[in-house]
Image: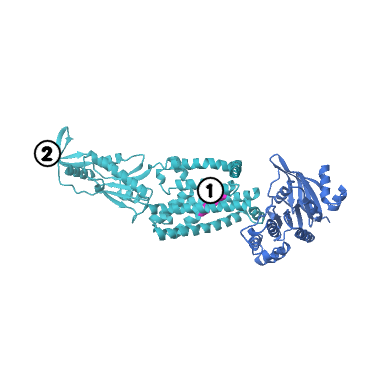
Amino acid sequence: MTSLAVARNVLRRILRDGRTVALIVILPLFFVLIYGNSFSGSYSNLRIAIVNEDNGLASVRTMEVGRITLTVDLAAAFVDALDPTVFDIVILDDAEEALALVGEGVWAALVFPKSFSNAVVSEAVRSSGERKVEFEGSSVTILPSEPVAGPLTQLVIDDSNPLVAGAVLAAFNAAFATVLETQQSSVTAESLLDVRRLYEGEIRMLDFTAPGIIGFAMTLITVMLTAMAVVRERTGGTLTRILIAPVSAWQVTLGYTLAFSLIAIFQAAELFLVSLWLFDIRFIGDPGAVILVIVLFAIGLQGIATLISTLAKNEAQAMQFVLFMLIPSIMLSGVFWPLETMPGTMRALSYAIPLTYANAALRKIMLTGHGLGALTFELSILGAIAFVTLFLSVLSMRRQAYTA
Amino acid sequence: MAAEQVIRAQDLRKMFGKRAALDGLSLSVSQGQLYGLAGPNGAGKTTLIRTLCGLLRPDEGEANLLGWKMPSTRVRSQLGYMPQDFAVYDDLSVMQNLEFFGQLYSLRRAQVRERANELLDLVELTDRKRDRVGTFSGGMRRRVSLAISLLHKPRLAFLDEPTAGVDPKLRRSFWDYFNALAEQGVTLLVTTHLVEEAQRCHVVGFLMAGRLLTEGAPDEILAQTNTTNLDDAFIVLQEQGQVKS
């Protein structure tokens, strides 16, 4: 009976707290909806560049009429075989230009050589033996010939994201397989490709996820610590006492920002050092650039946490509000699966999450060695988030002191 | 020459839902006056202090402190505020609390130390100044809170229930100290729900349901109600439902 009384009392108190009840109901739904909608498993809008120098002709020897030239256009058939919902295909004329775009928003560049069709057909006939084809209204027999030595198709791929790189290669292989099937060829797609990865050394899944996980750990700790500290300061009455002194809300907010930024930098250093030491994660960039990303990111997180604390009446509520931020952060910021796999609405939401930009910036620095020049976009967004949330958190501090 | 009106409040009204916490309340306190605001729990004492300090905006009326219309940032350095809750850092020591709040008022370390010695003597916590406040009883925390409020030598101090949970001997010391401060020209508005305590004030205001039942020197109130102590006077006034005009 005593246990029942305790349970009834606990439930009654929870049910009287409207915000907690709402969080209890909404949080699981929110979690499932975010998860279900964020990971579709299929890719879209992967930008690739293709240079088609293939003349589309295949020169073969026939039993009936000697050497003839067939028009087969196999490179064009390859492009047609690519799924337009997955790839955003840019057709270019200049191979150098196409190859230079890889890593700059283009995941892969393919350059089909002039004799691509010829090489594929002759290889197919050589491997599969005689075959009949229609030529100028008559049936002719193509005879096997010596393989035509021709340049392979050049493929340069951005392998900074092993998941995307794997998906691109798989899609290319499938498209090649479709084309080769029309030629009844037994050759493999791989034998036609000269694949060059953009970055030296293998980028493992661990390397790929490490920047995001480090960013997520920072989000978790910084947001939770700040939100709890501000709520405690408000409910304990010390925030009112501080703000009735001759100090401005700006000064108080900056004090908080300074303290939690230092904690965030310490945490990040700890995370980086342990990850490097124990797991040998890839880090080929500038540590100074990493520190800049972390400071801007930490200021933004601190601002968001202060805003969260405005909504929470107590520390328990603050914890639950923090979860509302953490769930989309880990699922929608591209930490585990690329943004390219997300449906449009979820992808739009991911652009509102600071970790998306911190993760992208840290990956650029750590995995591909990009310097500050390549981080202008991410740093601008992180800077804007830091500034706006800092400004809003000043207003929030003042409001909290006066409503405590 | 009349003393400066340090607190001037006119027709203050503050509603919480349908309940009027302040119901058209007007109040004037002169410089160097020790004003005791007495009344039962829920009478509106804390709401009045928070409104005067600018922490709450009145729905009607206005408050002026030290000549400035509130809320104003200009008076903050001259205000002392002791809230009813402890508002101290439990995880810091007494001295660390005093040093932090001293820094907010731009006090140098030596000034903090000098003031801390005086105030910790008053609140009888000198021996415990290195101890964490979290290990203290409620009454001891309130004493730390009082020391913080008076650390920067404010010209005007709002002390919300400073003697709650404090033993009688120490309460007497507090009231002696408040009187000494008033003699030095400091204006104090002190709330208490122990009506009899207000006997130690220059002026007493009896607050009930957001309105002043009466206001005056303790002797005047006793004469007016034909009673011998303020507890009885308050009960008489409450029964008469007499409201200050």
Q: Residue furthest front?
A: A1
Q: Amino acid at mark 2?
A: Met
Which quadrant of the rendered structure holds the N terminus of chain A? top right
Q: Horizontal and vertical percent for residue A230? A: 59, 52
Q: Is residue A390 above or below residue B169?
A: above
Q: Horizontal and vertical percent for residue A133? A: 17, 36
Q: Quadrant of residue B126?
A: bottom right
Which one of the lettered chains is coloured blue? B
Q: Principal SS element in the magenta part?
A: helix
Q: Is residue A137 above or below residue B218?
A: above
Q: Which residue is mark 2?
A: A63
Q: Which residue is mark 1?
A: A322
Q: Is residue A74 above or below residue B55?
A: above
Whether residue A141 is visible, yes or no, is yes
How dense is the environment of label 1, judged by Cα within 10 Å: few (below 14), some, or many (20 and up)? Answer: many
Q: Amino acid at mark 1?
A: Val
Choose between A370 and A399: the one closer to the eye: A399
Total residue callouts: 2
Q: Secondary structure at mark 1?
A: helix
Q: Specify whether A86 is left or right of A122.
A: right
Q: Specify whether A15 is left or right of B19.
A: left
Which one of the lettered chains is coloured cyan? A
Q: Horizontal and vertical percent for residue A216? A: 47, 51
Q: Chain of mark 1?
A: A
Magenta run includes residue A121: no
Which of labels 2 and 1 is toward the front?
Answer: 1
Q: Chain of mark 2?
A: A
Q: Which span of residues is magenta-colored? A: A298-307
